[in-house]
Image (cartoon, rainbow, N blue to C red):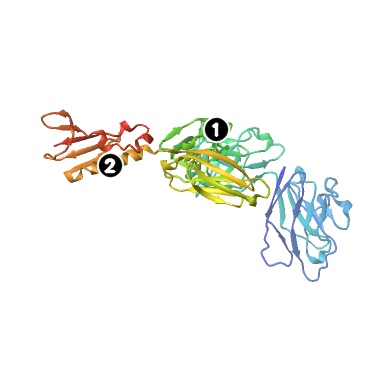
């Protein structure tokens, strides 16, 4: 149980030397714990307080009667049976004008009004009220991100004679009261009474209201969800305390779980959408760029309130150093993404233009006595180091760098060798495109223009009267098409590395 204590003040019409101050003005205590009523008082200078009394006020009638005594500093036996030994002063020296008390082992019957008295002197009119209608929000201020969800965590209490069966939540307008039918966002018994924008987006986390849990979740958060919210038990009570929600832009990123990636071994990447919400499932898309491909796959799986997608592939050299992106889209318009660069181990295949990094070390002791040499088979030494470790770095790799690289460790009179074969992938699309451009550039002095078609075919448009050595393919009244001989465009040195040279080593010339 939560006991909510508020202060009611009856101010005297004229200044009085008899004053009492409670701090804070509202006190909340939970059943089984304790409540501290913190207070100070004043009195006329001719009064010397020697005793303190606290009363628990009845529903009707005056408080300051002996039968209502819950604490008496000089005569403890006068306290009510149910509260004896549970109440004590925090400061027993009343000359310090401190009337604070602690009530231990809080019970539901402790709810009510309390009043302080200096016996034979004065009963202070100001009272502390403990209400059986309490509500607690944790936290009282909530920040939610667009597209995700907001959880209003709350508990409530009520008098013992109340049996709650229905719960209502309101979104308060800027002006006017909250508890009106037109601003209902949730009704546990009549869902149709909720505003259109909130239907099916709001639900109780605990439907059994006897557990005094009023927590709700609001899914698919939107900008207009910002504001104050209030809870009500229909036909019983509207709780005055409100909770506030602030809506911010989506900043959370998806999490991508990446296992160790080894060339030739199948691997699965897992992307989990941010938030643990049960609203509209997000759309999760994988985008893979950097290898000349553009692969998009979607494999959405929902487990309770977690949304994730998996991407399974077999790593190879072409994937090394490329980016993979997981894009999460909420409600079709709110997006967030995470991009990772893939690092493939066991990969000795590099692309043209990349940097090769080979390291060789000798684990014998002492390592400093080993002379390490890197060489390419059939060539002189490329890198040498006598520290027991040598690293060979080659920038801007070309196909000439492909081949077998040998590491030799010379230790006194004994040597050890290890080798690795490095393969250089030809970026044949770009290479062959450049070759076609070069061929067309040869025709520019003859007033020819060039461009690359979607199929990467070089097309030359020539003015009439050009003198070209071309093979005629088609001859019509208006247009003549010519075939440029393969040996004009082919390059015997590069041709073996281009996987499909016949797709690129031709062109068409159109004569006007």
Q: Nearer the viewer, mark 2 or mark 1?
A: 2
Q: Name which residue lies at 13% across and 28% down.
A: 476
Residue density around tag 1, few if under 14, some if 14–19, many if 20 or more, within 10 Å: some
* Residue 327 visible in the current orientation: no
Q: Is residue 107 left or right of residue 297?
A: right
Q: Nearer the viewer, residue 189 or 488?
A: 488
Per the rendering, the mark at residue 437 is 2
The extreme front residue here reads: 413
Q: Residues within 10 Å of mark 2 (few under 14, many from 20)?
A: some
Q: Residue furthest bottom?
A: 45
Measured in 3D between alpha carbons, the distance from the residue under mark 2 to the one under mark 1, in whole angstroms, is: 40 Å
Reply above or below: 379 against 487. Answer: below
Residue 122 lies in quadrant: bottom right
The front one of 293 and 121 is 293
Image quarter for residue 435?
top left
Quadrant, the C terminus = top left
Mark 1 sits on what residue?
267
Tag 1, which secondary structure? strand
Q: Earlier in the sequence, mark 2 or mark 1?
A: 1
């Amino acid at each position: 149980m939560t006991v909510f204590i508020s202060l009611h003040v009856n101010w005297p019409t004229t200044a009085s030397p008899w004053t009492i101050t409670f701090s804070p003005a509202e006190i909340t205590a939970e059943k089984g714990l304790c409540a501290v009523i913190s207070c100070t008082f004043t009195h006329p200078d001719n009064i010397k307080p020697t005793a303190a009394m606290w009363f628990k006020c009845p529903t009707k009638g005056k408080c300051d009667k002996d039968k209502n005594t819950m604490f008496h500093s000089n005569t403890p036996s006068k306290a009510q049976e149910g509260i004896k030994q549970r109440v004590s002063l925090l400061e027993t020296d009343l000359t310090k004008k401190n009337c604070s008390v602690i009530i231990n082992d809080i019970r539901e019957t402790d709810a009510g009004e309390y009043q302080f008295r200096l016996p034979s002197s004065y009963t202070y009119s100001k009272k502390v009220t403990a209400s059986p209608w309490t509500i607690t929000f944790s936290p009282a201020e909530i920040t939610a991100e667009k597209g995700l969800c907001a959880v209003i965590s709350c508990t409530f209490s009520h008098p013992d004679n109340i049996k709650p069966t229905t719960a209502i939540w309101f979104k308060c307008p800027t002006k006017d009261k909250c508890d009106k039918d037109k601003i209902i966002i949730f009704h546990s018994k009549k869902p149709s009474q909720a505003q259109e924008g909130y239907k099916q987006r709001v639900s109780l986390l605990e439907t059994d209201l006897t557990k005094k849990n009023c927590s709700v979740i609001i899914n698919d958060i939107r900008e207009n969800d910002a504001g104050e919210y209030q809870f009500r038990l229909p036909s019983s009570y509207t709780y005055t305390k409100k909770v506030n929600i602030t809506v911010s832009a989506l900043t959370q990123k998806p999490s991508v779980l990446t296992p160790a990636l080894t060339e030739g071994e199948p691997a699965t990447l897992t992307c989990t959408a941010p938030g643990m919400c049960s609203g509209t499932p997000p759309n999760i898309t994988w985008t893979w760029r950097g290898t000349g491909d553009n692969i998009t796959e979607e494999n959405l799986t929902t487990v309770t309130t977690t949304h994730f997608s998996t991407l399974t592939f077999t790593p190879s050299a072409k994937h090394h150093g490329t980016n993979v992106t997981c894009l999460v889209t909420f409600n079709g318009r709110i997006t967030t993404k995470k991009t990772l660069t893939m690092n493939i181990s066991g990969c000795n295949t590099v692309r043209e233009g990349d940097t090769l990094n080979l390291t060789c070390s000798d684990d014998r002791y002492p390592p400093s006595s080993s002379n390490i040499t890197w060489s390419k088979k059939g060539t002189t030494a490329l890198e040498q180091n006598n520290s027991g470790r040598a690293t060979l770095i080659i920038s801007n790799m070309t196909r000439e760098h492909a081949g077998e690289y040998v590491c030799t460790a010379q230790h006194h009179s004994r040597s050890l060798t290890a080798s690795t074969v490095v393969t250089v992938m030809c970026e044949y699309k770009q290479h062959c495109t450049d070759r076609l451009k070069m061929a067309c550039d040869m025709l520019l002095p003859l007033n020819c223009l060039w461009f690359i078609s979607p199929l990467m075919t070089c097309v030359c448009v020539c003015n009439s009267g050009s003198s070209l050595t071309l093979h005629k393919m088609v001859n019509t009244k208006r247009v003549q098409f010519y075939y440029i001989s393969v040996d004009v465009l082919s390059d015997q040195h590069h041709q073996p590395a281009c996987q499909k040279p016949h797709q690129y080593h031709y062109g068409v010339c159109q004569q006007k």
